[in-house]
Image (cartoon, grey):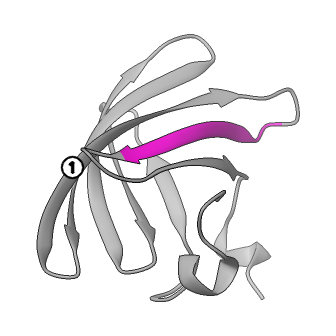
Amino acid sequence: MELWDREFIDLLGPGFIRFDDQGGGEFRFGAVTGTLDCSYAKASIHFNWEVSDEMDEASGQGWAELQDDGSLNGEISFHHGDESSFIATSWTSSTAC
């Protein structure tokens, strides 16, 4: 993520973003955990989200585009707040250290 370092991103466990085939998903980074409401296109996704941010409610939106190497490049933004680009790669428990 552009705005936050790895230590913050993984504060409560590995940071992640997950999309499901039902138009939803979830993410976590730092002390922010949230749910996603997604719209899919052929090689991209747009989403709105709601979270509990250190016990405060927050919301925002974001997008991601599938890259040739299988990663996602995107942006996540807080309503009236921070915006950060991100790169996400595929992760499974078997690849965790």
The verdict on residue 30 being magenta is no
Position of the N terminus by quadrant: bottom right
For the point 57% across and 21% down, the residue is 44
Q: Is residue 54 left or right of residue 42?
A: left
Amino acid beneath label 1: Ser
Above or below, 31 against 46 in this view is: below
State which quadrant residue 38 falls in: top left
The verdict on residue 72 being magenta is yes
Indicate the position of residue 95 as horizontal and vertical percent values.
78, 74
Q: How many marks?
A: 1
For the point 25% across and 44% down, the residue is 79
The residue under label 1 is 59
State which quadrant residue 12 falls in: bottom left
Q: Residues within 10 Å of mark 1 (few under 14, many from 20)?
A: some
Magenta segment boundaries in residue numbering: 70-77
Kindly state the secondary structure of the residue where label 1 is placed.
strand
Position of the C terminus by quadrant: bottom right
State which quadrant residue 73 falls in: top right
Above or below, 97 against 66 in this view is: below
Q: Is residue 49 left or right of residue 68?
A: left
For the point 78% across and 29% down, the residue is 67
